[in-house]
Amino acid sequence: MASVTYDHVVKKFGEVVAVNDLNFHIDDKEFLVLVGPSGCGKTTALRCLAGLEEITTGEIKIGERVVNEVPPKDRDIAMVFQSYALYPHMSVYDNMAFGLKLRKTPKTEIERRVKDTAKILNIEKLLKRKPRELSGGQRQRVAVGRAIVREPKVFLFDEPLSNLDAKLRVQMRAEITKLHHRLKTTFIYVTHDQVEAMTMGTRIAVINQGVLQQLDTPQKLYDKPDNLFVAGFIGSPAMNFFQSTIRKDNSKLYVDTGAFSVEIPAGKMKTFQSYDGRKVIFGIRPEDIHNPDYTPAGIKPSLVECKVDVTELMGNEIFLYLVAGKYNVVARVDPRTKYKVEDKVEVAFNMSNFQIFDPEKNPDNPIAVR
């Protein structure tokens, strides 16, 4: 098994910087997810590790070995691609065994590894079939199986579930997570889907425009995003943001959006006292905006008047798309809520859980105030 280190890695394509000073360490046996929007550099970072792209500057280590000049076949990694990349003329067995045959692995060892892997992935009955005879989920299992038989130090997954339907994606997410627990190997997984990232990774690296924005556990990314980009990217639906001013009134402190004001609880005032009169960005997640009739216990609600624009019944919850002044607001509320389109209502902002971002600290991507 092995750890992985990106040491100030830069990858340029001509004048375009795809990966910009990537610098972090992945622990042995960790499941790390690289997540970000399309074109952010996450797949390029993975391909640099695999040796499929030559880095411009910096070092990549697998364990203690610098692999910058090591050919892909000698890096002891296995990669699962988005496109499956199965050989259509070969059986499932031969697809899984092909890489081992190229390495002159003994026939008995190949048979053992393929059969053991097929059992793990529950594809034992498919070994004689050709890829065209398999469903999308079965093909994905074969692609994963082909990587497992290599018994590599590091597994690389490049958006492996993006071609599957929604139900199968959920199922395969769970299977890959169980596989990681079973194999106890380092997994590095690339996705643009933040739900996949949150449910699978032990840690998540959020990347945008080639730059690492934050690396932390899923819960810490959700609860304490470092900047505006991370706050808006992690969470579905996305966090609500409001251009605001922090205003002091007597002994109380408020966030004033121009359309409404909400009080900052006394326990959090100390953090924002020095921001009195300053422009900030106020953020609150949809799940922290409630129907006042069904407000959870233990929160500090602040009521805001809105007009209902759209309602979406999800069964276990309702998404409300609201309008407050010039702002659009999304709320996730109790399914017993009876609001209708065009209703003028009050919703309760949970001021026990909000974010403030300072646009003076990096106007392009304001930093969270802690």
Image (cartoon, rainbow, N blue to C red):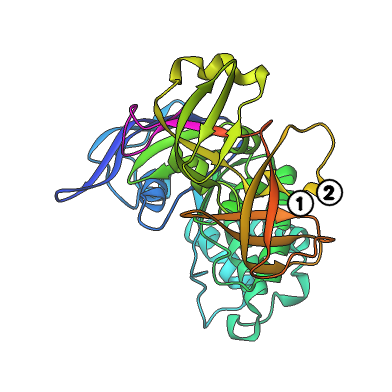
Element under disc 1: loop
Please, is residue 295 above or below residue 355 in the view? below
Camera-nearest residue between 289 and 222 = 289
Residue 209 — which label? none
Residue at 42 percent of width and 48 percent of height: 46
* 3D distance between C-alphas at marks 1 and 2: 6 Å
| Residue 31 coordinates in the image, percent (x, y) | 61, 41
Residue lying farthest front?
Answer: 250
Element under disc 2: helix
Within-10-Å neighbours for mark 1: few <14, some 14–19, many 20+: many
Camera-nearest residue between 265 and 20 = 265
Please, is residue 21 above or below residue 89 in the view? above
* Residue bearing the label numbered 2: 294
| Residue 292 coordinates in the image, percent (x, y) | 78, 47
Residue lying farthest bottom?
Answer: 133
Please, is residue 277 above or below residue 75 in the view? above
Q: Which amino acid does label 1 sit on?
A: Asn
* 212 to the left or right of 12: right
| Residue 30 coordinates in the image, percent (x, y) | 61, 36
Residue at 56 percent of width and 23 percent of height: 253
* Residue bearing the label numbered 1: 291
Q: Give the range drawn in magenta.
A: 356-370
